[in-house]
Image (cartoon, grey):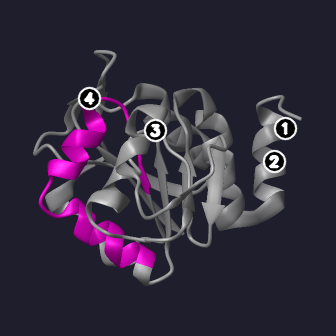
């Protein structure tokens, strides 16, 4: 199993690092991918993170899942990248899992991906999400798209992704190590 998590300047720290932490605890191959042309990417909280790989060095065809952190202006920078939406659309249409949290679900709306699906997003971007069934839930899954409302639900989001991709046993193992019930 191979998972890619995209990092753009201004990403929300815990929305990116929590899924990386959860999947690595589960023993899953997850790589952070910088879309900036530099391995060094700075979060909206001013925390510099070194990505595992650059966008231009990734063959997304071998991925099983794609994770899009939000944060401002991180989700805007994801939306501005000329190829991110193409990869997201490819993953969705081929049945691979895509997770988006906070403002990142706007990538679906701005590119007409997954119209009619149930989603959730940060309240500040809700007006953009026309054409979707917006539930307002903390975490929402509709087929292969998993969305979350914001940073405070990063662990729940990451565990929902882990469950969708690897099932109960992996989730139970990770939760036990984290002292979660």
Q: Earlier in the sequence, mark 3 or mark 1?
A: 3
- Residue at mark 2 to residue at mark 1: CA–CA distance: 5 Å
Question: What stretch of residues is rendered in magenta?
Answer: 67-92
Evaluate if marks 2 and 3 touch, with contact meaning CB atoms under 8 Å apart: no
Residue 10 is left or right of residue 150, and the answer is: left
- Check if mark 2's residue and mark 1's residue have beta carbons within 8 Å: yes
Q: Are marks 4 and 2 in contact (CB under 8 Å)?
A: no
Q: Secondary structure at mark 1?
A: helix
Pointer 3 local density, CA inside 10 Å: few below 14, some 14–19, many at least 20: many
- In depth, the one of 45 and 117 nearer the eye is 117
Task: Answer whether labels 3 and 1 touch (C-beta < 8 Å).
Answer: no
Identified at 20% across, 56% down, the residue is 55
Callout 4: helix, strand or loop?
A: loop
Residue carrying label 3: 102
Q: Of all residues shown, which one is farthest toward the bottom?
A: 94
Circle 4 residue: 10
Q: CA distance from mark 3 to mark 4?
A: 13 Å
Q: Tag 2 or tag 4, which sits nearer the N-term?
A: 4
Q: Nearer the viewer, mark 3 or mark 4?
A: 3
Question: Which one is earlier in the sequence, the residue at label 2 or at label 3?
Answer: 3
**For the residue carrying disc 4, how many other residues have a C-alpha within 10 Å: few (<14), some (14-19), or many (20+)?**
many
**Predominant secondary structure in magenta?**
helix
Q: Nearer the viewer, mark 4 or mark 1?
A: 4
The residue where tag 1 is placed is: 176
Residue sitting at x 22%, y 50%: 79
Give the camera-side residue of 104 and 161.
104
Residue at the disc numbered 2: 173
Residue 85 among magenta residues: yes
**Discs 2/3, front:** 3
């Amino acid at each position: 199993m191979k998972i890619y998590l995209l990092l753009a300047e201004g990403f929300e720290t815990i929305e990116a690092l929590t899924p990386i932490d959860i999947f690595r605890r589960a023993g899953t191959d997850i790589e952070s991918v910088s879309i900036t042309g530099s391995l060094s990417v700075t979060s909206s909280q001013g925390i510099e993170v070194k990505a595992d790989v650059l966008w231009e060095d990734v063959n997304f065809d071998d991925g099983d899942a794609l994770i899009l952190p939000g944060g401002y202006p991180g989700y805007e920078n994801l939306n501005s990248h000329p190829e991110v939406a193409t990869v997201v659309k490819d993953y969705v249409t081929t049945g691979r899992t895509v997770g988006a949290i906070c403002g990142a679900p706007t990538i679906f709306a701005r590119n007409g991906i997954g119209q009619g699906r149930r989603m959730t997003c940060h309240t500040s971007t809700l007006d953009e999400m026309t054409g979707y069934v917006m539930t307002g839930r903390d975490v929402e899954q509709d087929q292969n798209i998993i969305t979350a409302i914001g940073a405070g639900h990063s662990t729940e989001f990451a565990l929902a992704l882990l469950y969708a991709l690897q099932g109960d046993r992996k989730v139970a193992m990770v939760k036990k190590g984290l002292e979660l019930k």
